[in-house]
Structure formats: structure tokens, C-alpha cells
């Protein structure tokens, strides 16, 4: 247990003040000791995994931060059709994808090159290029923060949806994910419908790519669009804004805003996007498209900048503070709201901020 431990090195954004208390947990007993400390001192507790989908306040976190550090992948069952894996929540997600691809197990190959730990993948129900982690999750072993009780949740219990689960909604702050169970296929069908993926293989002249070729394609595409957080001068938290899922009435309101505020070619692009991924009851619109046509690519406040190749990503260009990032995010949201009437949602978890700071971020006044 350490006091006043800086959280900046533990986040891919490379931003954040100190935790009042910080502990690495390598066993169930470690978790229970941390829960006891938090309970005895009446302090809030935050589970910090790979640090890839969070922004920590410059003041840090006035509570107990626990960092899961027990890794491992175990095969529970394997037959001619599928393999069932039990994965420690602290296992690096991309290492798990690589492990599966090397063994020709299908189901998570399109989720390559996403930073963070396996447990965090469940929290956000990570998804990319037509796949979501919820497609393969069978169960999750969790610890109740209030009691230390360990129980198993089925996939249905986890309440998965687009970029959400019970872990970031109804049970937020109540559970620690300890292990997850995944079922991967021995034989699969490649998901190559997304334009970037389809174009990549057309250019390579590959009609039936192997799992390894799919993984390499995803890595190449993501490296062009999403700067993978590394030990460099700055970093990022992955996608800072969520994509839009609109009802028909909401889409028509957006379309009307386009008619008044943008040139005809932008409206044509919006209609093309609508027809690209038809769904039964929702209309998917990439938030990056709205940010781009609002002229926000490359916009900078302090050390924080909107990524020019994939504007869903906000970059720490070196020395950025959480205050810089929040100011930039607010400017992006207000600009998009003013010109399109759409309120874009923020994806990373915001840690250590006051209620007033969050209200200011989400306000359009």
C-alpha cells in the first residue's frame, strides 16, 4: 500500500494527479485487504486496470486505487467446435487476442490492438469492425465491493449494450471483475464488411484472409487512425467520444440541421452513411464525421489536440493537463451541438472530478 502515488504513469493518457492510497492486487486476499482499508477509512475505491479508457483529474483521486496485477489464460474446455477460456481480468487484452489468433481461435480477431486489460473490455463492451466482446463472453467472476463476496454473472447478467454494461451503469462502482470466461470458435467466418477492412484486403489482393492476416490488417488500420498509446511524450485514452445511434426522428432532425448549416455535398455524405450500415431500428452515424465537418480536426487547447486522422481521439501532445482535455472536449461538444443539434457522449471514465466540473463539461450554456 502506497500513499500519494502518482496515477499519470498508470494511464495511457499520461495525465493524472496522485491517489491518496494505491495498491497492486495479485490475489483475492489482496482485494479483500484493499476493501477493508477503504471501508475502515470510509474512502471511495476505484479499480484501475490498463488505464486506457480513463481521464484522471489533475488533483488525482481522494480515495483508494487498486490495480489488478494477476495475469493468466486457462483453457477450460475444447472440442471440435469451440474452446472455452478463463482469463484473469488483469491480462492484457491485446495479448489475449494474439494468443487466440496464434491458435486459430475465432471471435476476437477484429478487436486486435485495443489497449487495456481484459476486465476493462467487459466494462465498456469494447467493439470494433463488426465484433463486440459481448459476442464471446459467457460469464464473469466478480467481487462485491461492499461485502467481498465473490459470485459469477452470466453474459445476460452483465447487461451488455453498445459501449455499456452493468459495470458502467447500474452496478458502477459496486463490483470488481476478477475473471472472465470466453467461448471462441474453432472455425469461423471473417467479418470484413467495414470499408477500411474491405479496402485493405482489396489492395492486398487477398480474398480469403487467414486469422493472422485479419489481425495484421486491423493493427495496420488502427495504427493509421488511432495512435496506440506507447511510452512516448504524450498519449491518449482511445476513442474519447461515442458513435451515434439515432432513432428515425432524431436522424430527420439531424438531416434538417445539415440542410441549413452545411453544403449539399455534406448532406449527401450523411445519406450515404445512413445507407452503408442499415439496421432495424437505429441509424448509425460516425461521430468522427460530425467532428470533421465542423472543422475541429487538429484543434488544440493547451497540450490537448483533436487527432487529425481520427477525430474521435483526443491527444496529449506532451504536457497536457486534465483541465486541457476537459476544455477541449467541451469545445468539441458545444461546436457539434450548435451546428448539428446532436449531443455527443463521452466514452472514457472521468475520475476524481467534482460534480461542478462535470456539469460544466456537459453543459451547452
Image (spheres, rainbow, N blue to C red):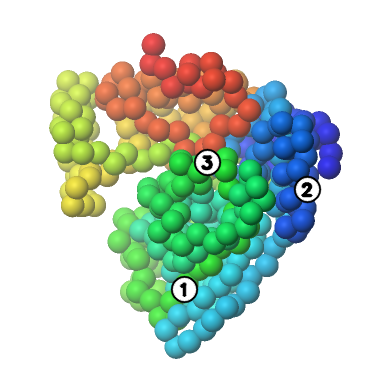
Residue 172, disc: 3
Percent x, y of residue 88: 64, 63
Q: Residues within 10 Å of mark 2 (few under 14, many from 20)?
A: some
> For the view shown, which residue lies furthest in the bottom direction?
80
User: Which of marks 1 and 2 precedes in the sequence?
Assistant: 2
Decide: is 192 above or below 125. below
Closer-to-camera residue (3/98)? 3
> For the view shown, which residue lies furthest in the top direction?
365
- Residue at position x 43%, y 77% in the image: 185
**SS class of the residue under badge 2?**
helix
Percent x, y of residue 58: 67, 24
Decide: is 50 above or below 118. above
Image quarter of residue 180: bottom right
- Residue at position x 67%, y 33% in the image: 44
Residue 255, disc: none
Percent x, y of residue 351: 60, 32
Q: Which residue is mark 2?
A: 33
Percent x, y of residue 172: 52, 41
Mark 3 → mark 1, Cα distance in angstroms = 28 Å
Q: Which residue is mark 1?
A: 184
Q: On the rendered image, what quadrant is the C terminus found in?
A: top left
Mark 2 → mark 3, Cα distance in angstroms = 21 Å
**SS class of the residue under badge 3?**
loop
Q: Residues within 10 Å of mark 1 (few under 14, many from 20)?
A: many
User: Which of marks 1 and 3 precedes in the sequence?
Assistant: 3
Amino acid at each position: 500500500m502506497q500513499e500519494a502515488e502518482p496515477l499519470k504513469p498508470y494511464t495511457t493518457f499520461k495525465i493524472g494527479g496522485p491517489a491518496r492510497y494505491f495498491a497492486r492486487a495479485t490475489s483475492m486476499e489482496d482485494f479483500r485487504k484493499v476493501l477493508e482499508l477503504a471501508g475502515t477509512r470510509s474512502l471511495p475505491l476505484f479499480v484501475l486496470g490498463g488505464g486506457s479508457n480513463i481521464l484522471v483529474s489533475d488533483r488525482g483521486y481522494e480515495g483508494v486505487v487498486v490495480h489488478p496485477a494477476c495475469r493468466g489464460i486457462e483453457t477450460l474446455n475444447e472440442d471440435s467446435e469451440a474452446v472455452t477460456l478463463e482469463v484473469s481480468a488483469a491480462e492484457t487484452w491485446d495479448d489475449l487476442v494474439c494468443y487466440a489468433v496464434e491458435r486459430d481461435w475465432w471471435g476476437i480477431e477484429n478487436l486486435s490492438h485495443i489497449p487495456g486489460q481484459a476486465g476493462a473490455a467487459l466494462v465498456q463492451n469494447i467493439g470494433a469492425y463488426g465484433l463486440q466482446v459481448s459476442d464471446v463472453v459467457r460469464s464473469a467472476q466478480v467481487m462485491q465491493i461492499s461485502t467481498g463476496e465473490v459470485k459469477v454473472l452470466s453474459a445476460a447478467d452483465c447487461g451488455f449494450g453498445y459501449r455499456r454494461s452493468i459495470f458502467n451503469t447500474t452496478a458502477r462502482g459496486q463490483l470488481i471483475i476478477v475473471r472472465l470466461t470466453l467461448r471462441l470458435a474453432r472455425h469461423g467466418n471473417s467479418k470484413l464488411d467495414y470499408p477500411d477492412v474491405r479496402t485493405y484486403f482489396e489492395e492486398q489482393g487477398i480474398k480469403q484472409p487467414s486469422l493472422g492476416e485479419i489481425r495484421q490488417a486491423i493493427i495496420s488500420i488502427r495504427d493509421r487512425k488511432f495512435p496506440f498509446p506507447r511510452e512516448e511524450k504524450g498519449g491518449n485514452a482511445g476513442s474519447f467520444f461515442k458513435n451515434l445511434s439515432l432513432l428515425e426522428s432524431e436522424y430527420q432532425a439531424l438531416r434538417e440541421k445539415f440542410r441549413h448549416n452545411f453544403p449539399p455535398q455534406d448532406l449527401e455524405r450523411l445519406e450515404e452513411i445512413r445507407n452503408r450500415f442499415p439496421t432495424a431500428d437505429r441509424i448509425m452515424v460516425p461521430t468522427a464525421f460530425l467532428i470533421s465537418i465542423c472543422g475541429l480536426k487538429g484543434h488544440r487547447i493547451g497540450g490537448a489536440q483533436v487527432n487529425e486522422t481520427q477525430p474521435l481521439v483526443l491527444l496529449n501532445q506532451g504536457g497536457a493537463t486534465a483541465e486541457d482535455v476537459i476544455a477541449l472536449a467541451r469545445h468539441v461538444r458545444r461546436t457539434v451541438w450548435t451546428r448539428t443539434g446532436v449531443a455527443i457522449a463521452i466514452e472514457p471514465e472521468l475520475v476524481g472530478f467534482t460534480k461542478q466540473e462535470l456539469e460544466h463539461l456537459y453543459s451547452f450554456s
